[in-house]
Image (cartoon, helix red, strand yellow):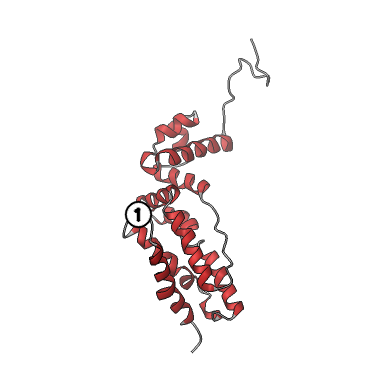
């Protein structure tokens, strides 16, 4: 009997289990998403790429959507709040960053996943960590700076106020189906909706 350099009889790759196998499956799913988008993601392709079988995938993720959401979460990036010195400048830059992201291949994957999730709350909650609820954090940051500068009242520091501009931009992609929002739309959202809403939160 022969052994490989690690001392395993017969050589050949070690059988992966647990976290190592799960990571291999997720890496394969990420690669498939990047190559083919959510529409091209299949359990068969992921299993082949990961060097495992479909049963190993189904034991961890019950369906293609669950696997797609898990893989996307590995791709999502954290947004760094801009600091231009004014609330208007910060809001415009944040929306422009979001516009570039939603118009990118990763943004297309996110939109496809949101559409596939429909009203399923368990999947929407996971996706909103990148596209909704957690996206309030940078907006609350720039609002907090605006309050400190005297540009806004403390009453403006509310998650629904913070994310209204983002929600309007997302509608341009999800409802209107645009590939990217024109910059004049971004300026209009900030000047005609977001800033008046923030300034209107001053105590009466």
Residue at 46% of width from left, 76% of height from top? 195
Identify which residue, 19 or 5, lies in the foreground.
5
Crowdedness of circle 1 by 10 Å Cα count: few (<14), some, many (20+)? few
For the residue labelled by badge 1, is the local secondary structure a helix, a strand or a loop?
loop
Name the residue at the left extreme: 176
Whole-percent x, y for residue 33 in the image: 44, 41
Whole-percent x, y for residue 116 in the image: 35, 50
Identify which residue, 52 or 150, lies in the foreground.
150
Q: Quadrant of the N terminus?
A: top right
Height in image: 140 above or below 10?
A: below
The residue that disc 1 covers is: 118
Using residue 14 as the reference point, say whether residue 204 is left or right of it. left
Identify which residue, 142 or 3, lies in the foreground.
142
Q: In terms of image quadrants, where is residue 144?
A: bottom right
Q: In terms of image quadrants, where is residue 176?
A: bottom left
Q: How many marks?
A: 1
Residue at 37% of width from left, 49% of height from top? 112
């Amino acid at each position: 009997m022969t052994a490989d350099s690690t001392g395993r009889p017969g050589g050949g790759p070690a059988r992966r289990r647990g976290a190592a196998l799960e990571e291999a499956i997720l890496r394969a799913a990420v690669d498939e998403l990047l190559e083919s988008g959510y529409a091209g993601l299949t359990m068969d392709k992921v299993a082949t790429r990961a060097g495992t079988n479909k049963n190993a995938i189904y034991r961890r993720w019950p369906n293609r959507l669950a696997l797609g959401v898990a893989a996307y979460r590995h791709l999502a990036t954290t947004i760094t709040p801009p600091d231009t010195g004014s609330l208007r400048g910060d809001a415009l830059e944040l929306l422009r960053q979001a516009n570039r992201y939603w118009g990118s291949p990763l943004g297309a994957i996110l939109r496809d996943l949101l559409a596939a999730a429909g009203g399923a709350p368990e999947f929407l909650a996971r996706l909103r960590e990148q596209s909704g609820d957690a996206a309030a954090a940078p907006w609350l940051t720039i609002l907090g700076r605006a309050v400190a500068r005297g540009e806004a009242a403390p009453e403006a520091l509310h998650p629904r106020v913070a994310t209204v501009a983002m929600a309007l931009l997302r509608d341009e992609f999800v409802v209107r189906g645009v590939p990217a929002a024109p910059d004049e739309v971004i300026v209009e959202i900030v000047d005609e909706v977001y800033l008046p809403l923030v300034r209107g939160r001053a105590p009466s």
